[in-house]
Amino acid sequence: MTDAENKYSTVAKIAFENALHAELPNDNSIDGLISAFESACGTDDAGNEFWSARELAVLLGYQDYRNFSKIIEKAKASCEGSGHAPEDHFVDATEMVQIGSGAAREIDDVKLSRYASYLVAQNGDARKRPIAFAQTYFAIQTRRQEIKDAEEAAYSPLSEDQKRVLLREEIKEHNKHLASAAKSSGVVQPIDFAIFQTYGYKGLYGGLDRPGIQRRKGLRAKQNILDHMGSTELAANLFRATQTEDKLRREGIKGKDAANRAHFEVGAKVRQTISEIGGTMPEALPPAEDIKKVEKRLKKAKIGLLPETK
């Protein structure tokens, strides 16, 4: 032990020796202090952060825990005065600590939330360098947590309408890439590409071609099946398109027949994956509202594809 540590009271020394990770850094540097404060942070059974009051007392340079207890009481008053319930941030606890020769002793402690630790630092003696540092440290960390909580509260998942519009646009873009890859493989004429697409649908839809899918879903011949797919079905078709493009380019597939087989194989593999994870086969999914109507509704409501951020 250093000379400074020998000056601690018996209880303070017990707390110091049994601190989870908190040690007063020898150089008292900023990096050392940050490391010490963050290492002293524990987590309860509910996943909430806390600091042991006895460990924090050591880190803040208090040699007598009785003096530090007075700071905690002031912090509780500040907490209540700010409209927060002290019992939510200052939780009484007891700890068994070893005091030598195999003997143990029960000591009182307080589990302090990040906010409580901040209030403790604010009510401490700012002339102490660790206290001055802690005031800044907990102020910054508390603000970071507030921002994180606000961002999480503001976040709202995409609605089904938003996901459909987003995925439909992605498929439009990737079908262009797929057409380019197919062309490089020898699928040149429009009729050839239509046949190529049919093979992909047959692989994914258990042998059904485009007209077969329309009949299965009760769609008219002029209705685009992609415009009436829900987000799950669109995602499956997007995966089919992207993986087929990748396969054609990666393997350097040449010839219309080889390209058709590749598209069928990828579609069938996606179907197999859906089956293995217990998903609904795409042909069994119900038709969705025309995507054009969805786009108009979102535009009218001024709802974008992604949640707004501030």
Image (cartoon, rainbow, N blue to C red):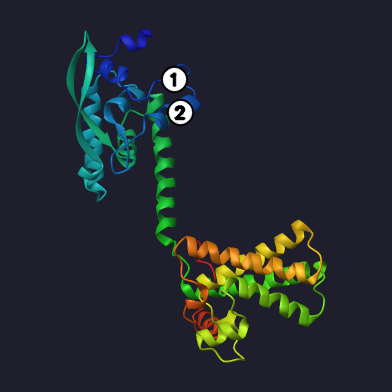
Q: Position of residue 289 (x, y in %)?
A: 50, 84
- The quadrant in which residue 262 appears is bottom right
Task: Tell me which amino acid carries mark 2.
Answer: Ser
User: Which residue position is annotated with label 2?
Assistant: 35
Closer to the camera, 224 or 61?
Answer: 224
Q: Residues within 10 Å of mark 2 (few under 14, many from 20)?
A: some
Left or right for 202, reference 97:
right
User: Which residue position is annotated with label 1?
Assistant: 25
Looking at the image, can residue 292 be seen? Answer: no
Relative height, residue 181 to residue 20 (above, below): below
In percent of the image, x 71 and y 60: which residue is there?
Answer: 247
Q: Are marks 2 and 1 in contact (CB under 8 Å)?
A: yes
Residue 46 got which mark?
none
Left or right for 204, reference 45:
right
Q: Position of residue 284 (x, y in %)?
A: 47, 77
Relative height, residue 68 to residue 275 (above, below): above
Left or right for 133, reference 265:
left
Left or right for 243, reference 187:
left
Q: Position of residue 234 (x, y in %)?
A: 56, 72
In percent of the image, x 23 and y 19: which residue is there?
Answer: 97
Quarter of the N terminus within the rendering: top left
Compare marks 2 and 1 and give the one earlier in the sequence: 1
Task: Tell me which amino acid carries mark 1.
Answer: Pro
Q: Residues within 10 Å of mark 1 (few under 14, many from 20)?
A: some
Looking at the image, can residue 220 be seen? Answer: yes
Distance from Cα at disc 2 to Cα at disc 1: 9 Å
Relative height, residue 103 to residue 209 (above, below): above
Relative height, residue 182 to residue 61 (above, below): below
Closer to the camera, 153 or 288?
Answer: 288
- Secondary structure beneath dot 2 equals helix
- The quadrant in which residue 66 appears is top left
In percent of the image, x 54 and y 82: which residue is there?
Answer: 228
